[in-house]
Amino acid sequence: MENGHQPRANKSITESDHEDLGFRFEHSYSELPSLFFSKAEAELFPAPRLTIFNEALAKDLNLDFSQLPPDEIAKIFTGQSLPVGAKPLAQAYAGHQYGGFTILGDGRALLLGEHRTKNGELFDIQFKGSGITPYSRRGDGRAALGPMLREYIISEAMWYLNIPTTRSLAVATTGENVYRERPLPGAVLTRVASSHIRVGTFQFAAYRRDHLALRKLADYTISRHYPEISNHDDKYLELFRQVAERQAVLIAKWLGVGFVHGVMNTDNTSIAGETIDYGPCAFMNHYHPDTVFSSIDHHGRYCFANQTAIAQWNLVRFAEALLPLIDKQQEKAVDIMTAEVNRLPGIFEKRRLDLMRSKLGLKSAKTTDEDLIYDLLKVMETTKLDYTNTWRDLPTTRIDTNPSYQVAEFKQWYQRWIQRLSQDGETLESARLRMNQVNPYIIPRNHYVEAALSAADVNNDLRPLRRLVSALSQPAIENQDFKDLREPPPEDQACYKTFCGT
Ligand code: AMP
Ligand code: MG
């Protein structure tokens, strides 16, 4: 592909001769019909420099960069020197963005291939911010350092919170500025994902009315993510059910930690059920169901409590895209999928209740639990309690000492909860260990994320970021060294806004 603007990296630098990095690339996605991708290459960047490299993830992936000087690593992670076996391409997809359908595609990303680990797992290795592609539309194909480090921090935090997510292997600066409201250092993030197949990938094939391509995509998705259903009589229907189930699990987990994704478009809905595309996402401090951080989400479409409904809305778009595979007779296909879609609220609610019960340390399920959960959330809302800290504090003596909890509504609710625990034969001590696994001590609070980013961006000082990432890698543990990171922001900083298109 030639775009006429920038020389392509591979014109001057070909494949890296570092055979021993451990990449074992496969290219199964590129065997799909050609409408699903375009070959593309990274642009040439003047002065790549490695900002951060995820040693732990590299080890998990059986990659070894220890013999390589940082400059060489930086060339690899900006696409200037391709690892052996990489064959970069940009993926095509469509998506409903804020409810409106658009044809999209990787406008600033490149898939290098799928890396096979020694224990047989397959992961997409993708650059984000490596230059324009055939799908860039009016975008510049680039990314700024701050947002890429932000994705690094939050995706790693999600991973350690035990929430399905893409991960971040490295961030490297390119040596050139990107122009947003002001010039910012350009950077490339290397993202690792189970795959980048989205609801929008299916929508793209359906929109093109290419039913053969749609079937091939569905078969590929089944073999890659749901091989256990490949011999199922109604495997495409089963695919829908499996994807729905994973979305229900994912959203419940988001709700459990106060995560607001911020841009739940169908192109950002992973078929593998991972959290993907960390744009304007952020974690809630004090509880409010309408919490929104994204500066462009004026109507709160993607607010905290709407995420369940939006995930279901996205799944309805998935169901529509699958219709041609469900039955030759459209009416019959619609009837079948309508029945499936009608089951979604129940599936999502069950997952949410299960998770909330575990946050309360409950082992059994009682019909009154729903009220108990709802009433706690209501007290948190009216008394502006910090979401993360309240859950964590429940089984501790902090409940007696912290002034925030010395209000009548909370105390009444607390007594009900203690009684409910005793119905399960539980004490605070016995519940605490289990509760601590699902009620984190540390989350990536916005004001600390911003402080870490600004130190990295403005002063080139990565120490706060490294400290934050290190704290986030053990979120369940009450490490006194990281006690400060538990503090909600001062009231005057509480009105946090995030931005898209970064
Ligand atoms: P996102 O909001 O990151 O999910 O992006 C939505 C779409 O816009 C995707 O197709 C992206 O590839 C594309 N996009 C976002 N930023 C840029 C950019 N700077 N240049 C080109 N395309 C972009
Ligand atoms: Mg996206």
Image (cartoon, rainbow, N blue to C red):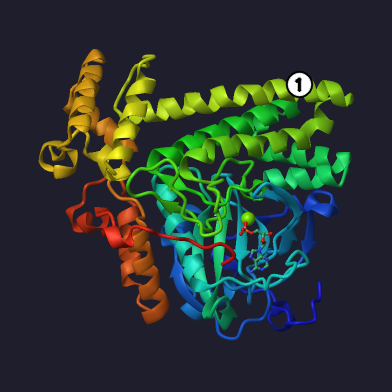
Q: Is mark 1 within 8 Å of ligand 2?
A: no
Residue 430 visible from this viewpoint: no
Instruction: Determine whether, in the image, residue 148 is placed left or right of residue 128.
Output: left
Quarter, ligand 2:
bottom right
* Residue 21, image x, y percentages: 55, 65
* Residue situated furthest left in the rendering: 401
- The quarter holding residue 192 reads bottom right
Against 327, residue 165 (above or below) is below
From the viewer's side, name the closer residue of 325 and 294: 294
- Badge 1 local density, few (<14 within 10 Å), some, or many (20+)? some
From the viewer's side, name the closer residue of 231 and 415: 415
* Residue 26, image x, y percentages: 69, 54
Q: Residue at x 19, y 58 (%)?
A: 481
Which quarter of the figure is the N terminus placed in? bottom right
Against 443, residue 352 (above or below) is above
Q: Residue at x 37, y 28 (%)?
A: 374
Residue 57 visible from this viewpoint: yes
Which quarter of the figure is the C terminus placed in? bottom right
Q: What residue is shown with label 1?
A: 336
From the viewer's side, name the closer residue of 65 and 237: 237
- The quarter holding residue 484 reads bottom left
Q: Amino acid at mark 1?
A: Ile
Instruction: Determine whether, in the image, residue 500 is placed left or right of residue 212.
Output: left
* Residue 355, image x, y percentages: 41, 30
Instruction: Determine whether, in the image, residue 204 is placed left or right of residue 297.
Output: right
Query: What SS does tag 1 mark?
Result: helix
